[in-house]
Image: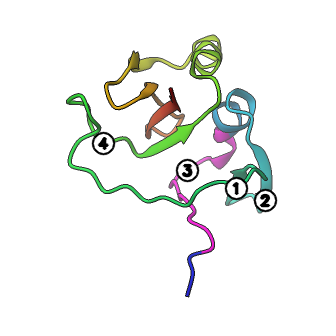
């Protein structure tokens, strides 16, 4: 048996509110829309990972999601322009990532990062 995909599910009373954060700012594609569930994604090849953590590193809380991007500073600028408050960073961490934390429209803590 081989794991084919891991999907993060976020409970939300109004899934349409996800569009600004995940589609407009982060650039994910809307892959499926049944009204009660919207699935955003990318057709890019990605590594399947599942992290189990006691903290988020550097004494931060464990984020609900981690999203790796190719340009953290552009993602940061887009988040700020869209009115999302940055909760941590941006910071260059000693383990080789540049990152910041932001909350999505549903209160989920999202770690936006890029490897150095």
Pick whichever of labels 1 and 4 is earlier in the sequence: 1
Q: Which mark is residue 62?
A: 4
Q: Which mark is residue 39?
A: 1
Pick whichever of labels 2 and 3 is earlier in the sequence: 3
- What residue is shown with label 3? 13
In the image, is 27 to the left or to the right of 13?
Answer: right
Answer above or below: position of 108 versus 39: above
Q: Which mark is residue 73?
A: none
- What residue is shown with label 2? 32
Identified at 54% across, 34% down, the residue is 105
- Judged from the image, the secondary structure of the residue bearing numbered disc 4 is loop
In the image, is 8 to the left or to the right of 60?
Answer: right
Pick whichever of labels 1 and 3 is earlier in the sequence: 3
Queried whether the magenta region covers residue 17, the answer comes back as yes
Foreground mark, 2 or 4, reads 4
The magenta span reads 4-18
Determine the CA span between mark 4 and mark 3: 23 Å
Where's residue 14, x and y in %? 61, 47
Magenta region, mostly helix, strand or loop? loop
Queried whether the magenta region covers residue 28, the answer comes back as no
Foreground mark, 4 or 3, reads 4
Q: Residues within 10 Å of mark 4 (few under 14, many from 20)?
A: some
Pick whichever of labels 2 and 4 is earlier in the sequence: 2
**Camera-side residue of 83 and 2:** 2
Q: Does the CB distance between marks 2 and 1 fall below 8 Å?
A: yes
Determine the CA span between mark 2 and mark 4: 28 Å
Foreground mark, 1 or 4, reads 4
């Amino acid at each position: 048996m081989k794991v084919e995909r891991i999907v993060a599910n976020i409970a939300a009373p109004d899934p349409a509110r996800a569009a600004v954060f995940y589609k407009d700012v982060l650039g994910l594609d809307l892959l499926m829309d049944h009204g009660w569930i919207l699935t955003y994604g990318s057709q890019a090849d990605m590594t399947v990972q599942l992290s189990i953590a006691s903290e988020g590193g550097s004494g931060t809380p464990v984020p609900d999601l981690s999203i790796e991007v190719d340009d953290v500073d552009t993602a940061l600028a887009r988040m700020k322009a869209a009115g999302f408050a940055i909760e941590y960073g941006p910071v260059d961490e000693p383990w080789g990532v540049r990152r910041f934390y932001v909350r999505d429209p549903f209160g989920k803590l999202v770690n936006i990062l890029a490897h150095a």
